[in-house]
């Protein structure tokens, strides 16, 4: 008897915005840095995503919405026609496997560096508060983080417009939807959290004001795509990029409650603690969000197959996103379904090789058997 019959919940279909997912396994957005210095998606990326297209849904890696949003070497963009054209070949490769494909929209905010910015300008954030981290990898090598410049009030709508234009390009490239990256200490998270947002205008102070930036982004994107094709990602427990606010529970329950009104494709939660926990209180759970968000919930961060099946069976999650296991196991769904062992975890030193190594060279289980034979 295979795990398929014992744990059908993870392998049952699910509807997202009229898209039928063949299973509940989602490929989480994974920054891999293969788009080159011009940030144009390419054939190598198309092969990588196609290898993993037996999952129910793929969320493409975080993709910068503007030149100002940049802050990671060789990550893809969606702010030029050339980049959108490059994405088309990747979308076509994934759609060739009948797998829906969403694009994650990204602005790094203070987690950037002046060497990524036009004319060497400072990175921007909600407030002029430096990220307390060791260093950042930049075009000029490892550098210390800089104190960012706080966006002026009249600049915020310009960034919102960048998100809208990025969503429009994603739609034109053929993506089925977009995910708004409001997690992991990047720009939207910097506005949401009291630790990083010390503003005194309409985008700061109260939770309602700190949520306003995300609200305006959601509503701008809804002029391009229906709500059923828009997801939002949050990291209520996360410490990554120097995050963690004392009022985190109140903040994120408010945000989820507000987002519930739109009828979004899903709410993507990094509820797991494998990426680090800020220890500002008891970790937030899926059940807390289920109480205030009635749409599809996607869980993420450190899930095993067993934990994923339990979360779905208990009704706390509808979808489970897997990240690192999908790096080294392109056939993760098949391995789960048949009880096959996983490949050894990939060495992080090759995750960002900028080439095929550590990217498209992981064998499927069947390929491994063939080599042994």
Image (cartoon, rainbow, N blue to C red):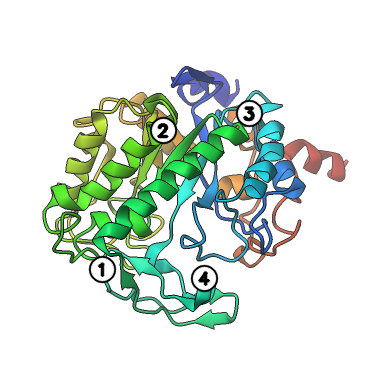
- Percent x, y of residue 192: 25, 54
Position above or below: 168 against 213: above
Work out whether mark 2 precedes mark 1 in sequence or the reverse, and give the earlier one.
Answer: 1
Give the side of residue 129 with respect to residue 301, left or right.
left
Q: Which image quarter: residue 220?
A: top left
The CA distance from mark 2 to mark 1 is 27 Å
Q: Is mark 3 on a helix, strand or loop?
A: helix
Q: Which of marks 3 and 1 is in front?
A: 1
Q: Which residue is drawn at 63% across and 67% down?
A: 349
Residue tagged by mark 1? 127
Depth check, mark 4 against mark 2: the one in front is 4
Q: Specify whether 245 is left or right of 306.
A: left
Q: Name the residue under label 3.
A: 338
Q: Which of marks 3 and 2 is nearer the N terminus?
A: 2
The residue pinned by badge 4 equals 118
Residue 203 in the image: above or below residue 195: above
Front residue of 309/79: it is: 79
Which label belongs to residue 230?
Answer: 2
* Residue at x-position 72% and y-position 38%: 89
Circle 1: element type: loop
Q: Given contact means CB atoms under 8 Å apart, are the residues at marks 3 and 2 in contact?
A: no
Kindly state the secondary structure of the residue where label 4 is placed: helix
First in sequence: mark 4 vs mark 2: 4
Q: Where is residue 210 in the image (x, y as percent from the top left)?
A: 20, 53
Q: Is residue 140 visible?
A: yes
Q: Judge by depth and name the residue closer to the eye, 53 or 368.
A: 53
Where residue 177 sits: x, y (%)? 49, 32
């Amino acid at each position: 008897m295979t795990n398929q019959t014992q744990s059908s919940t993870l392998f049952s279909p699910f509807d997202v915005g009229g898209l039928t997912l063949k299973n509940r396994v989602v490929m989480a957005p994974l920054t891999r840095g293969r788009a080159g210095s011009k940030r144009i998606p390419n054939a190598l990326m198309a092969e990588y995503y196609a290898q993993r297209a037996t999952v129910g849904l793929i969320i493409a890696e975080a993709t910068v919405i503007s030149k100002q949003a940049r802050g990671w070497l060789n990550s893809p963009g969606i702010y030029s026609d050339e980049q959108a054209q490059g994405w088309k070949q990747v979308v076509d490769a994934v759609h060739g496997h009948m797998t829906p494909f969403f694009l994650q929209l990204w602005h790094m905010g203070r987690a950037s560096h002046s060497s990524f910015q036009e004319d060497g300008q400072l990175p921007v954030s909600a407030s002029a508060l430096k990220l307390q981290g060791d260093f950042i990898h930049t075009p000029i090598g490892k550098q210390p983080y800089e104190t960012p410049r706080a966006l002026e009030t009249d600049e915020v709508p310009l960034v919102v417009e960048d998100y809208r234009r990025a969503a429009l390009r994603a739609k034109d490239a053929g993506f089925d939807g977009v995910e708004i990256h409001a997690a992991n200490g990047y720009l939207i998270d910097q506005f949401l959290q009291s630790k990083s947002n010390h503003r005194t205008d309409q985008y700061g102070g109260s939770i309602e004001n700190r949520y306003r930036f995300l609200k305006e982004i959601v509503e701008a994107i809804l002029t391009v795509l229906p709500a059923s094709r828009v997801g939002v990602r949050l990291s209520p427990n996360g410490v990554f990029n120097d995050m963690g606010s004392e009022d985190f529970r109140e903040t994120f329950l408010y945000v989820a409650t507000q987002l519930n009104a739109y009828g979004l494709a899903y709410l993507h939660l990094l509820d797991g603690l494998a990426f680090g926990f800020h220890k500002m209180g008891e970790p937030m759970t899926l059940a807390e969000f289920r109480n205030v968000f009635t749409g599809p919930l996607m869980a993420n961060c450190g899930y095993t197959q067993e934990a994923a099946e339990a979360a779905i069976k208990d009704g706390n999650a509808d979808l489970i996103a897997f990240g690192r296991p999908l790096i080294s196991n392109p056939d993760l769904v098949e391995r789960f379904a048949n009880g096959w062992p996983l490949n050894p975890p990939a060495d992080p030193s090759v995750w960002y090789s900028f080439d095929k190594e550590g990217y498209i060279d992981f064998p499927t289980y069947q390929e491994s058997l063939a080599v042994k034979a």
